Image (tube, rainbow, N blue to C red):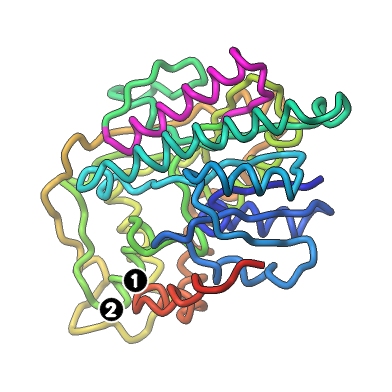
Amino acid sequence: MKILVTGGAGFIGSAVVRHIIENTADEVMVVDCLTYAGNLESLAPVANDPRYAFSRIDITDSKSVNEIFASYQPDIVMHLAAESHVDRSIDGPAAFIQTNVMGTFVLLEAARSYYASLNDERKAAFRFHHISTDEVYGDLHGTDDLFTEETPYAPSSPYSASKAASDHLVRAWNRTYKLPTVLTNCSNNYGPYHFPEKLIPLIILNALAGKPLPVYGDGKQVRDWLYVEDHARALYKVATEGKIGETYNIGGHNERKNIDVVKTICNILDEIVADKPGNIASFADLITYVTDRPGHDMRYAIDATKIQKELGWVPEETFESGIEKTVHWYLNNKEWWQRVQDGSYAGERLGLNK
């Protein structure tokens, strides 16, 4: 198959692309605007494979999007391109509306036009897979409740509201125009190649540099953590085997309080880093509580029963195994994150259409 992956230079997108190239016979066309979080160095392990191609495109540019559909002729679209950082959405919501809402609209319209041009055999095989987040559901106040595919939407931030809007567009295009769509909502991802502004890589890299480890509020916010390579396997399975019109929640079955995540990372680093920065006895000495962000949801937790029963997917990593792998990856791949921190990775954005 030929798979078009939007946002394929991002954290989750690049994991999907690496998974497809390394584990299937499919071809991949990565479409990415290469904003600050897009990093072609995350695709370096597969960039020389003849089944991989890249095109720098803004998904809000309808002319370019229609052209890539016409030239590449995809069998599947996996739509991951999105602005995704909650704090950034609070400071500047306009970019989130533009990319997440308008970008999804442009892609849906391009896919609808393209789909109409296909013969019956290719129509039967075509899928538009929209990748979303559990944050569209708002938060859970009890300790036992879980998000299911029927949980009502109640987004709290500009980011989650923009993703909720894009989810609604996808479902509307399926019902009104019969575009064959599938949709997934996932819990918090972590793992290799994660942009350093997010919690887990931020804590790892701040700790190594002897900087404060910022924890919002009291740190008791609960998240369900999903190892990104487990997520990539799930996304490919939904894209290729999921039932048209259906939604699948993808979770890691790993609920942790934010403060416990931070302490776990500190404990791992204490064991494997001999020379601690400054005069600290433990990396946990660097933990610093900061003012909570506005509208901060307290708990997310996914019920992933449906994807397990219908498609046979379960996560392979526990939080303990996944976080251990993640910490070691950052220790062993300093060049990748140092180039992100000093901005030199941005040079990869120029003249790299393949």
| Front in this rendered view, residue 339 or 99 | 99
Which of the 4 image quarters holds residue 315?
top right
Could you tell me which residue is drawn at 38 percent across and 23 percent down? 144
Quadrant placement of the N terminus: top right
Could you tell me which residue is drawn at 37 percent across and 62 percent down? 265
Q: Position of residue 319 (x, y in %)?
A: 49, 50
Q: Position of residue 283 (x, y in %)?
A: 27, 71
Any mark on residue 61, and which?
A: none
The residue to which callout 2 is attached is: 209
Start and end of the magenta stretch? 157-183
Quadrant placement of the C terminus: bottom right
Q: Is residue 215 left or right of residue 135?
A: left
Q: Position of residue 305 (x, y in %)?
A: 59, 25
The residue to which callout 1 is attached is: 205
Residue type of the residue flagged with mark 1: Leu
Element at label 1: helix
Number of numbered callouts drawn = 2
Q: Is residue 39 left or right of residue 248?
A: left
| Front in this rendered view, residue 45 or 92 | 92
Badge 2 crowding class, 10 Å Cα cut-off, few under 14, some 14 to 19, many 20 or more, is few
Task: Residue 199: say if magenta.
Answer: no
Q: Position of residue 32 (x, y in %)?
A: 54, 55
Which of the 4 image quarters holds residue 249?
top right
